Amino acid sequence: VPRLGGLCSILPLAWVEARDMRLWTLVMMAAVGTGAWAAEAGGAEVPSVTVCMGGEPGVPSIWSVEQIVSKIFSGIGVRLEWHSDSCPASPYVIKIGFADEPPKGVSDSALAYARPYEGIHIVVLYARVKRLQPTGTQRFLAYVLVHEITHVLEGVSRHSNGGIMKARWDSADYYWIRRDALAFAEEDVELIHLGLDARAAHLAANLPMPVAAR
């Protein structure tokens, strides 16, 4: 059985060293250019993120999972647009897939993994999610997805000391998840919106998402 809170982003350490400074420079430039999300709220357009996640055999009620995820992001001023049958051909789409077993190098306790420096792909290890939470699996899966989508939107490999982006959830966090009340730490709300500004800046300039060199 995986340890509690086994959530992580998997990427080579060299990616971190090569990309962190450049990425943070881009994020801060975008924040200055557009006015960070918390500036003047009046008339500001709610940022939208397109997410593709098809139905997976053995994963029930994907629609209800999507609704929970959307509600959590809506609470911080981010709108998610879900696609299942067809996925828009854009480098700014987040794609969620499922796998029975992780690739080599993924932690034995991980429930999902993302590559935030790539900015696209998330893989959920659903068998592990179900084993850890055999009851209330849909809600728990939703929070796993929120955690990984946040990694992609923030664009950096990091965790917070508390809330949804903790590296490992404990029994208190699971208590709040069951009550649909585990929240983002304040710094994660800020980083999500800064990351969205950076993505929007790339889109406006017709630039591809920055992909770390392997």
Image (spheres, grey):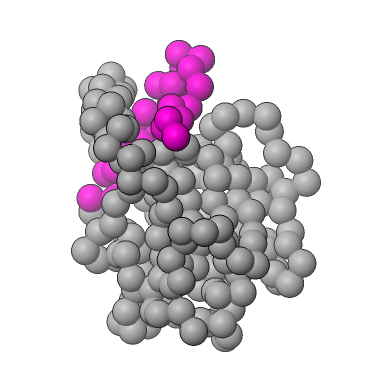
Q: Residue at x 64, y 62 (%)?
A: 99
Q: Between residues 33 and 77, which one lies in front from this camera angle?
A: 33
The furthest residue to the front: 104
What's drawn in magenta, residue-wise? 187-214
Could you tell me residue 153's position as x and y percent?
41, 42
Q: Residue at x 60, y 58 (%)?
A: 66
Task: Say whether residue 204 is visible.
Answer: yes
**Side of 212 relative to 25 (left or right):** right
**Side of 99 relative to 55 (left or right):** left
Could you tell me residue 23's position as x and y percent?
31, 30
Q: Is residue 161 above or below residue 207?
A: below
Task: Say whether residue 144 is visible.
Answer: no
Q: Residue at x 46, y 58 (%)?
A: 105
Could you tell me residue 122's position as x and y percent?
54, 51
Could you tell me residue 69's position as x and y percent?
52, 59
Q: Is residue 137 above or below residue 23?
A: below
The furthest residue to the top: 205
Quarter of the image with the C terminus is top left
Q: Quadrant of residue 152?
A: top left
Q: Main secondary structure of the magenta part?
A: helix
Q: Between residues 199 and 112, which one lies in front from this camera angle?
A: 112
